[in-house]
Image (spheres, grey):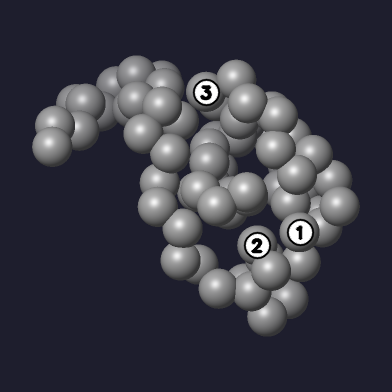
Amino acid sequence: MLRWQQAQGKRHALDGLPPRPGESFETLCGQVVEVVRADIPELGGQWFAWTCRECDAVWRRRENIPQFVS
């Protein structure tokens, strides 16, 4: 299942279960990032990071959604 998760200053996409604080995951764009407590809104964090454009492009290809053009 594709989902979005904030980590290391960006909103990244991942395929699988949501990580917990202290866990790392591989993003759709190929980065390995770690989640901290401030990245989890349910734990008091805020959803404020910009979306990773590379993850967004992979997500759109997988879901057959037109690519974002800025």
Q: Is residue 44 left or right of residue 37?
A: left
User: In what element is the residue under mark 2?
Assistant: helix
Q: Amino acid at mark 3?
A: Cys
Per the model, the C-alpha gap separating discs 2 and 3 is 19 Å
User: In what element is the residue under mark 1?
Assistant: loop
The disc at residue 29 is: 3
> Residue drawn at (13%, 37%), measured in percent from left and top?
70
Q: Is residue 14 above or below residue 62?
A: below
**Residue pointed to by mark 2:** 39
User: In what element is the residue under mark 3?
Assistant: loop
Q: Is residue 66 left or right of residue 55?
A: left
Q: Amino acid at mark 1?
A: Val
Q: Is residue 6 above or below residue 2?
A: below
Q: Which quadrant would residue 61 be assigned to in this image?
A: top left
Foreground residue among 8 and 41: 8
Foreground residue among 52 and 61: 52
Q: Is residue 51 above or below residue 27?
A: below
Q: Which quadrant would residue 42 be assigned to in this image?
A: bottom right
Q: Position of residue 11 (x, y in %)?
A: 50, 48
Dot 1 and dot 2 residues touching (CB under 8 Å): yes
Q: Position of residue 7 (x, y in %)?
A: 63, 50
Q: Is residue 63 left or right of residue 16?
A: left
Q: Position of residue 63 (x, y in %)?
A: 37, 26
Residue count near mark 3 (Cα–Cα under 10 Å), binned few <14, some 14–19, many ≥20: some
- Sequence order check, earlier mark of 2 and 3: 3
Q: Is residue 28 visible in the rendered structure shown here?
A: yes
Residue count near mark 1 (Cα–Cα under 10 Å), binned few <14, some 14–19, many ≥20: some
Quarter that holds the N terminus: top right
The disc at residue 36 is: 1
Dot 2 and dot 3 residues touching (CB under 8 Å): no
Q: Amino acid at mark 2?
A: Asp
